[in-house]
């Protein structure tokens, strides 16, 4: 069966949809922010655990979506941790996103397979800017 691909084509005056953080109301009473949720461009919700960017525990999860977040609550970068959690590659990624301004890493563990993780990554990552 052929894979289907969809491309968002905004109207001339529409702002392109962006992923945005939607903190969990049920976790608001906790003194420490341990969980959050992101709403992807598609409108889908992604619940994630929150870690400081320098916390190596965030990189210990396998088959997870890792989202690097700036203090301004913008997604800096995102990646699939992979099935083996390759430490050297994840460590390089962690250092790179911290250098790019990430203060937290949000870990989404609910994507069931590689295809679901890829879909989440595509939904959460900002569109590439043409000025790049």
Image (cartoon, rainbow, N blue to C red):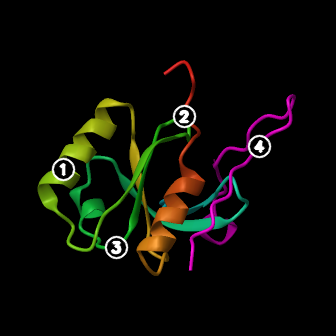
Question: Crowding near pointer 2: few (<14 within 10 Å), some, many (20+)?
Answer: few
Residue occupied by mark 2 = 128
CB-based contact (under 8 Å), mark 3 and mark 1 = no
Q: Name the residue at 39% across, 41% down.
A: 103
Please tell me whether residue 15 belongs to the stretch shown in magenta. yes
- Label 1: which secondary element: helix
Real-space CA distance between mark 2 and mark 3, rounded to the nearest whole angstrom: 25 Å
* Mark before the other along the chain sequence, 2 or 1: 1
Labels 1, 4: front one = 4
Labels 2, 4: front one = 4
**Disc marking residue 91:** 1
Q: Name the residue at 64% across, 56% down.
A: 40
Q: Quadrant of residue 51?
A: bottom left
Q: Quadrant of residue 107?
A: bottom left
Labels 2, 3: front one = 2
Residue occupied by mark 4 = 9
Q: What residue range appears in magenta?
A: 1-30
Real-space CA distance between mark 2 and mark 4, rounded to the nearest whole angstrom: 14 Å
* Mark before the other along the chain sequence, 2 or 4: 4
Question: Crowding near pointer 3: few (<14 within 10 Å), some, many (20+)?
Answer: many
- Label 3: which secondary element: loop
Question: Crowding near pointer 4: few (<14 within 10 Å), some, many (20+)?
Answer: few
46, above or below 112, in the image: above
Quadrant (top left, top right, bottom left, bottom right) of the N terminus = bottom right
CB-based contact (under 8 Å), mark 3 and mark 4 = no
* Mark before the other along the chain sequence, 1 or 4: 4
Q: Is residue 100 left or right of residue 16?
A: left
């Amino acid at each position: 069966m052929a894979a289907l691909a969809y491309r968002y084509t905004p109207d001339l005056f529409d702002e392109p949809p962006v992923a945005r953080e939607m903190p969990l109301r049920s976790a608001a009473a906790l003194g420490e922010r341990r969980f959050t949720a992101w709403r992807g461009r598609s409108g889908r919700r992604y619940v994630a655990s929150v870690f400081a960017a320098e916390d190596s525990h965030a990189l210990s999860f396998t088959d997870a979506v890792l989202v690097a977040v700036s203090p301004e609550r913008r997604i800096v970068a995102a990646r699939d941790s992979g099935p083996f959690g390759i430490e050297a590659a994840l460590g390089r990624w962690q250092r790179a996103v911290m250098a790019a301004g990430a203060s937290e890493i949000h870990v989404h563990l609910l994507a069931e397979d590689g295809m679901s993780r890829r879909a989440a990554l595509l939904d959460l990552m900002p569109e590439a800017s043409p000025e790049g």
